[in-house]
Amino acid sequence: MPGGRLTQQERQQIAVGLADGLAYAEIARRLERPTSTITREVMRNGGPTGYRADLAHRATQQRTHQRRQTASPGARAEPQPYGRDAQAVSDYQEALTTVFMTSGLPKMMARVLGCLYTTDSGSLTASELAQRLQVSPATISKAITFLESIELVRRERDPHRRRDRYVVDDDLWYQSMLRSARDNAQLVDAARQGVNVLGAGTPAATRLENIARFLDYVTESLTRAAEQAREILYSKPQPDTDNTAAAKPSSDRE
């Protein structure tokens, strides 16, 4: 499987594949590249409808040139705890950012979230985020405001440093699911109002009633699943006594 950066010819093939309606996985197979490489390439260069091969190639060259200008001679990736490979962590953070982008998050918000989730503390200040992502504090502030509005980041006051820290933890996904449920409930109410306006039994009203019934069921199921999953999330895993016993020497078991 080829490695290294995408060539201009490969980018042209990606553009042709997108125009033909091919999935990322199929384009990747034809180029003998990982699907994640194609996904990342498309999402950072206009998305599936805005991707242009020549523009993407020039943008990549510009980003590479800028990184070389800003990097100091002999600069190395930030050392990682627990003996982690710093480059592997950096690559994973970029891949995670791409996943967040494909799920609908704007690029900068996805980068902030990817940065937070790959820290052991699960929290960073605005200045720490700006330094790690090499962007301005104003850019971080805008991204955090958006992530807070959809409850994917929580703000905490650091009493020792007198500044805010931005936190990701397990409970945020639970809160996000509840927010989705509330949004669905509003759609249900709006759809049923439309039934009254358009007249029950008419084609348009029937369509809205079906939407309301569907979303009502999904909302109830989502809320119930979130509650059940939260209990699992906070329960400690039980040790596997069978495997533990099997791992001991026979003399110990006897």
Image (cartoon, rainbow, N blue to C red):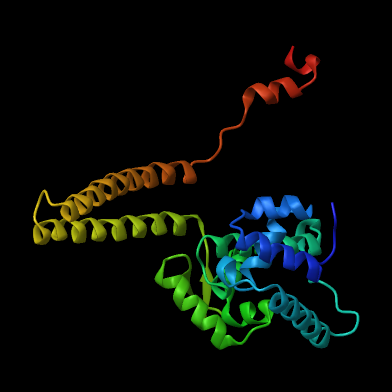
* Residue 133 picture location, percent across and down: 67, 77
Q: Is residue 115 left or right of residue 82?
A: left
Residue 60 sits above or below residue 39 on the image: below
* Residue 156 picture location, percent across and down: 47, 73
In front: 212, or 167? 212
Q: Is residue 158 visible?
A: no
Location of the C terminus (image quadrant) = top right
In front: 121, or 183? 183
Residue 68 sits above or below residue 239 on the image: below
Residue 231 sits above or below residue 9 on the image: above
Q: Is residue 33 left or right of residue 187?
A: right
* Residue ranking furthest to the top: 254
Write down the quadrant of residue 28 in the picture: bottom right
* Residue 68 picture location, percent across and down: 83, 83
Write down the quadrant of residue 44 in the picture: bottom right
Q: How many marks?
A: 0
Write down the quadrant of residue 249 in the picture: top right
* Residue 196 picture location, percent across and down: 9, 58
* Residue ranking furthest to the right: 74
In front: 205, or 191? 205
At x 60%, y 59%, the residue is: 99
At x 11%, y 48%, the residue is: 201
In front: 248, or 193? 193
Q: Is residue 83 visible?
A: yes
Q: Is residue 232 left or right of residue 110?
A: left
Q: Is residue 103 left or right of residue 64?
A: left
